[in-house]
Image: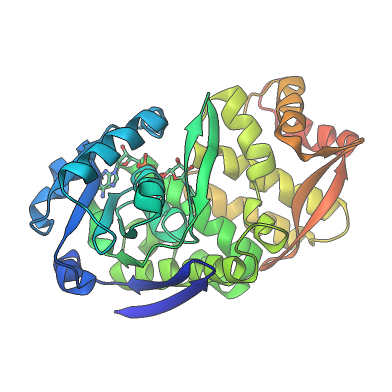
């Protein structure tokens, strides 16, 4: 087991990598706790949960809403949770976001910890201290900055994860390597087959190193004033594609990363070898590089996302693999790149 600790304004978070859920109870060191999970994770893995009360939430973004939080408050009340108790979220990013938000606001904050069960949650959603819910159809509109007491990463959970969820997670892994760890990027290139077959040693290495990138950035900028924006590599276009083309998050940010890599190259930052490596790795993990898109709608969505300033949109670009910068990009330049990525014109 490898331990990393993150200290933020709201306390210190212990990240346990390669741990086992069987150690959860001892690790929590609390008598009273409640587990928040979703239906799928409960069905597949409920047998390994410690004997605490369990409350289930529904599946999908539609469950990441205020109504679900109220259901959780009700369950906390019924379980007699007090400030010395703990809320444990066991599930993907949605469970972590909702459970963390409910815990951080119940009684003005009870402690919480996560056992992330998707690759995306292990490398990204469970770490960093942002918790939140969607509101009126807008993602993550309501939320808190509050660090989980611990994050216990048990990689055995990944064995039951559907392929498309795994790919989703790898898209974030590639992003984190691209913006913050060139060595990790090269390692993933070398070990992609083993990563895809969930070789334990390789997964531990990849999750640990990509988590470390996020932790480094979050520590530098817990409240998202500057450095943390680098985590949005691929996301500026990605979010717009998610909204307009209705594709999965991992797919959308993959196309977003390809676009950002091309913009980086055009603006004289990333060399052509770096740009090709990004595209090849995305393809290697079965993620898309192109899409049929309505360019006007996509650009419109990006502008609505408040990333526009005059005739420019802020993008996270790469100087080289492992180092990123936030740079304004001309909309005309963006149009040209998008034109190349459009599957049908
Ligand atoms: N707070 C943050 O910093 C942060 C960062 C990134 C993403 N997020 C959020 O995370 C969410 C996405 O997370 P996600 O991709 O984990 O999605 P998710 O939580 O919806 O999980 C995906 C699916 O996999 C299932 N699942 C979970 N674990 C499983 C397992 N071990 N075996 C089989 N099936 C399993 C779930 O039931 C669900 O149907 C988004 O809402 C996003 O906004 C938050």
Q: Is residue 220 left or right of residue 93?
A: right
Q: Quadrant of ligand 1?
A: top left
* Number of callouts: 0
User: Quick one: 257 or 224, which is closer to the camera?
Assistant: 224
**Residue 166 spot, x, y in % from top left:** 38, 48
Colouring style: rainbow
The answer to which quarter of the image holds residue 278 is: bottom right
Left or right side of 309 for 23: left
Q: Residue at x 65, y 65 (%)?
A: 221
The residue positioned 89% from the left and 34% from the top of the image is: 332
Can residue 289 be seen in this snapshot? no
Image position of 55 with respect to 66: above or below:
below
Quarter of the image that includes the C terminus: top right
Q: Nearer the viewer, residue 122 or 147?
A: 147
Q: Horizontal and vertical percent for residue 19?
A: 25, 72
Vertical position of residue 116 compared to residue 62: above or below = below
Q: Is residue 224 visible?
A: yes
Picture residue at 24% right of the left edge, 56% below the top: 82
């Amino acid at each position: 087991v490898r331990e990393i600790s993150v200290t933020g304004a709201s306390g210190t978070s212990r990240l346990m990598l390669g741990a086992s859920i069987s150690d959860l109870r001892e690790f929590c060191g609390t008598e009273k706790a409640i587990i928040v999970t979703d239906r799928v994770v409960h069905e597949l893995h409920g047998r390994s949960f410690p004997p605490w009360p369990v409350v289930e939430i529904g599946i999908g973004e539609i469950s990441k809403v205020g109504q679900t939080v109220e259901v959780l408050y009700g369950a906390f009340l019924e379980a007699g949770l007090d400030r010395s108790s703990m809320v444990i979220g066991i599930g993907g990013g949605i469970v972590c976001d909702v459970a963390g938000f409910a815990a951080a606001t119940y009684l003005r904050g009870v402690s919480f910890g996560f056992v992330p069960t998707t690759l995306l949650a292990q490398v990204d959603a469970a770490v960093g201290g942002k918790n939140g819910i969607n509101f009126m159809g807008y993602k993550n509109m309501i939320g808190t900055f509050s660090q989980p007491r611990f994050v216990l990463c048990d990689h055995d959970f990944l064995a039951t994860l559907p392929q498309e969820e795994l790919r989703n997670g790898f898209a974030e892994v590639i992003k984190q390597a691209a913006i913050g760890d060139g060595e990790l990027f090269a390692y993933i290139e070398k070990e992609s087959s083993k990563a895809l077959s969930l070789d334990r040693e390789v997964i531990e290495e990849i999750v640990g190193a990509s988590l470390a990138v996020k932790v480094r950035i979050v520590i530098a900028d817990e409240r998202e004033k500057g450095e943390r924006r680098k985590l949005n590599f691929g996301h500026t276009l990605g979010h717009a594609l998610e909204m307009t083309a209705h594709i999965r998050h991992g797919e959308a940010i993959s196309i977003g990363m390809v676009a950002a890599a091309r913009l980086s190259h055009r603006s004289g930052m990333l060399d052509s070898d770096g740009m090709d490596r990004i595209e090849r790795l995305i393809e290697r993990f079965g993620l898309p590089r192109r899409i049929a898109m309505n360019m006007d709608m996509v650009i419109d969505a990006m502008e609505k996302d408040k990333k526009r300033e005059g005739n420019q949109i802020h993008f996270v670009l790469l100087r080289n693999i492992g180092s990123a910068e936030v740079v304004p990009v001309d909309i005309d330049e963006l149009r040209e790149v998008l034109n190349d990525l459009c599957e049908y014109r």
